[in-house]
Image (spheres, grey):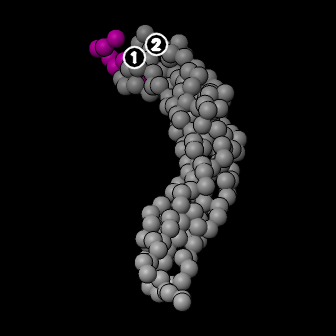
Amino acid sequence: MFTGTITPIACPKGFYCGEGLTEPLPCPLGTYNDFEYQEDQSGCSICPEGQYCAEIGLAEPTGYCDEGCLCTEGSTVSCPRKCSIGYYCDQGIELPCPGGYACPLEQMLATGQYQNFPCEEGFYCPVGSNSTTMNSCPSGAYCPSRSEDYQTCAPGSYNPNTEQAGPESCLACNPGTYCETSFLSNFTDFCPPGFY
């Protein structure tokens, strides 16, 4: 004698089961489901940023993105895109290059590879720089190696040149002149009559 289902079977992880189905349906590519008893496709979660889901019916993501690669939400392969110039990738997530350094290559790694590309003396490299000579240090300032921003010459001094590396490039105002503010490329003016 034949008998039908006595007790329904729980819908397994990686699948969803609508009412009256005889077989569970797999979560699609780029998604996973780590819970039993899901009733519809909305129970399938999109694969998170930094990971990929390469098959249907997954109970968890396939794995982390390859080093130097970017995996956005819903990725289905381990390296859908190389990390962009000016950025490095850490576990499949793209991050801007730290200030004072440059990320001049595609697929830069999170292992500190950018430390091989410090900003050069006389230049400054803000966050996200793609060249070690990203910005010339302006007159009135100086930029040591690994500068994220320029350092201004103090009041009482000036610097007429660009791309200078150290504070010694800031010249003291000559007698008979004055330098009223910081960040000057020339003295402010000659001392007026009655002053020195």
- At label 2, the amino acid type is Ala
Q: Magenta stretch?
A: 187-196
Question: Would residue 139 be seen by someone viewing this image from the given angle?
Answer: no
Residue situated furthest bottom in the rendering: 1
Question: Would residue 147 be seen by someone viewing this image from the given angle?
Answer: yes
Return the disc, 2 or 1, that comes first in the chain's sequence. Answer: 1
Residue highlighted by disc 2: 172
Does 193 lie within the magenta span? yes
Predominant secondary structure, magenta span? loop
* Alpha-carbon span between mark 2 and mark 1: 6 Å
Q: Residues within 10 Å of mark 1 (few under 14, many from 20)?
A: some
Q: Quadrant of the N terminus?
A: bottom right
The residue that appears at 56% across and 56% down in the rendered structure is 61
Residue 125: x %, y % from top left: 57, 34
Hey, which quadrant is residue 81 in on the image? bottom right
- At label 1, the amino acid type is Gly
Q: Does 34 sit left or right of 178 as displayed?
A: right
Residue highlighted by disc 1: 156
Q: State whether residue 154 is above or below residue 134.
A: above
Q: Quadrant of the C terminus?
A: top left
